[in-house]
Amino acid sequence: MRTVAKHEKTAKFFRHASRRFLFLVCLGIGGALLSATLVRFAPGYGVQERELDPRWSAQSVEALRQKQMFHEGLLMFYVHYVSALAHGDLGESDSLKRPVRELLRQRLPVTGNSVIRGLGIAWLAAALLASLGLASRGWFYEASGTAFSSLLLSLPSAVVAMLAVHLRTPVFCAISVAVFPRLHRYIRSLLVRSYDQPHVLAARARGLRGAAIFWRHVVPVAASPLLALLGVSFAIGFGAAIPIEALCDSPGLGQLAWQAALSRDLPLIVNVTLVVCLVMLTANSLTELAGRAVAGNSQ
Amino acid sequence: MSPLQKVAGVILCIIFVLMVLAAVLVPAPYARQFRDVPNASPSRVHPLGTDVLGRDSLSRLLYGTRVSLLLAPAAALLSTVIAALLGSAAGFLGGWFERIVLALTDLSLALPWLFLLLTVRAMLPLDVPPMASVIIAFLMMGLLGWQASVRVICAAARDVRDSDYLLLARSSGCKPARLMLGHVTPNLRPLFYAQFWISIPLFILTEANLSILGLGVMEPMPSWGNLMRGFEDFSTLSANPWKLAPLVLLVIVVMCFQLVLPSEEVTQ
């Protein structure tokens, strides 16, 4: 009986995982079509430099436009866009005059590296501070921890970036400072809620040691939401990377998105956003699946 | 209400009064340039000195406070209204509508908020008049900032839908519109207020980030964000600490907003 139940649980898990994968694929296609629409209908689409050259007569410019429309009607545009995308061609940046794919290949690892290192430090600091606060449960410790994280929470990421430039600290440190207060607040709240569960109270009444209660009874209850928070923290980290990379002059995706927004380079910003969205959704799906696996094991 | 919350409330009230009385209190219009005294230190004429163009810093700070503190609640109100409509309808109606709304919400929550704002901002012209830039920033934040609230409101509306008193009202022949307006909405009202309050500090910080990056409120209109653009050279700030006034004010206001809200509502 137990083996059958285990097989059923595994099958259910894989069904859910395949549904998530299918959702990601559909979303990728939908996102690509939406990106194509945004690029196609953006003001200035299809305007060639030759049209702005005063030496060309009005009739010649009109003929050029007609030729362009004949070669690329709306349906043909979508077909070209999606088939190019299937071959990994994301178009060319209007402002940088370079293939978007090449720019993403250069910039994504820089941001990924900074965000992962920043999140690592922020998670470590937030978990440590929240656990210590829970262990001591003293008024002073709790108040000072909350005041510190509230102060950091009140600072715009761009100001943290300026401070990082002034102090010459690496980008990942600035990202960890921007992410830490949000993580601390949620982790603390989750741990406090888990600690107030009746079974934890019973374990305390039976005289179990604090560390044993924490690892055996508090952490397993909080594990699933903590994994969900891990997925969300990637979005927070990538969001904080925009002002930080832009102001710290770090050649990552955040700086690229900012430059694209300033120069109204739609093919670039739309594709950067699409790629970031897919990265975030993959991270969220993985953490959600991990959360389900953890919840299934603990049941 | 705890004493700390009362103090935070009083501070917010004082700042709001200063904001309203900005036109009376300021020594000069925010765009007027005193070309003889650029980068001046604090004096009786210019209590917070002047900026690099000779504009009075106190005037710019008070008008900037007005822009930021009107912009953020207006955007918060818009986003809360959208979230209230979508979340209550999704929770109350359930079924495929709820699934679509929640899937859309999850999708937009997965995307970092600033990336979304930058994409939308890139589609709009950059060289707009200052007032138009304020309206664009307000509309962008209001129209794109509803996602987090929708989830919470939808869950609460679902609870109300499954409650006994709603079953009784339904069995008494109450029509869906009356159920929604007479029973669901009044029960969700405290949640709407909480979501509104939570959104304000978030939008204040977003406006600051966007304006520092040159994509928010445009010069010469002051806002906390574009007043902080001068912080790029932090070394001059240690010699002129009064230039930190916009940051200090922003931190105080955001902290006060966080304190005024009960912690449970913030963490939900």
Image (tube, coloured by chain):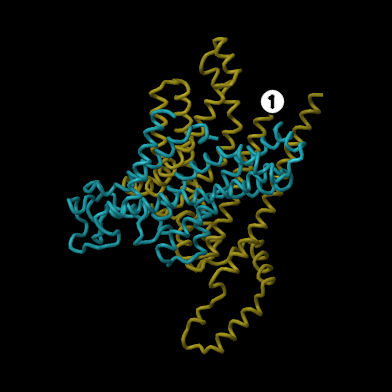
Chain colours: A yellow, B cyan
Question: Is A28 situated left or right of A133 in this image?
Answer: right
Question: Amino acid type of disc 1?
Answer: Gln
Q: Residue placed farthest to the top in the image? A: A206
Q: Which chain's residue wears label 1?
A: A
The x and y percentages for residue B188 are: 60, 39
Quadrant of the frame with the C terminus of chain A? top right
The x and y percentages for residue A34 are: 63, 61
> Label 1 crowding class (10 Å Cα cut-off): few <14, some 14-19, many 20+?
few
Question: Is B262 situated left or right of A15 in this image?
Answer: left
What SS does tag 1 mark? Answer: loop
Q: Nearer the viewer, residue B3 or A6?
A: B3
The answer to whether residue A1 is above or below residue B32 is above
Question: Is B43 situated left or right of B183 in this image?
Answer: left
Can the viewer see residue A168 in this picture? no
**Residue lying at 82% horizontally and 24% vertically, measured from the top left:** A1
Name the image quarter holding residue A143: top left
The answer to whether residue A148 is above or below residue A112 is above
**Residue lying at 46% horizontally and 33% vertically, measured from the top left:** A126
Q: Nearer the viewer, residue B150 or A91?
A: B150
Q: Which residue is mark 1?
A: A299
Q: Nearer the viewer, residue A28 or B216?
A: B216
The x and y percentages for residue A12 are: 75, 36
Name the image quarter holding residue B94: top right
The x and y percentages for residue B145 are: 53, 50
Give the mark count.
1
Can the viewer see residue B77 in this picture? yes
Question: Is A35 situated left or right of A240 in this image?
Answer: right
Q: Nearer the viewer, residue A218 or B230?
A: B230
**Residue lying at 48% horizontally and 50% vertically, measured from the top left:** A111
Name the image quarter holding residue A208: top right
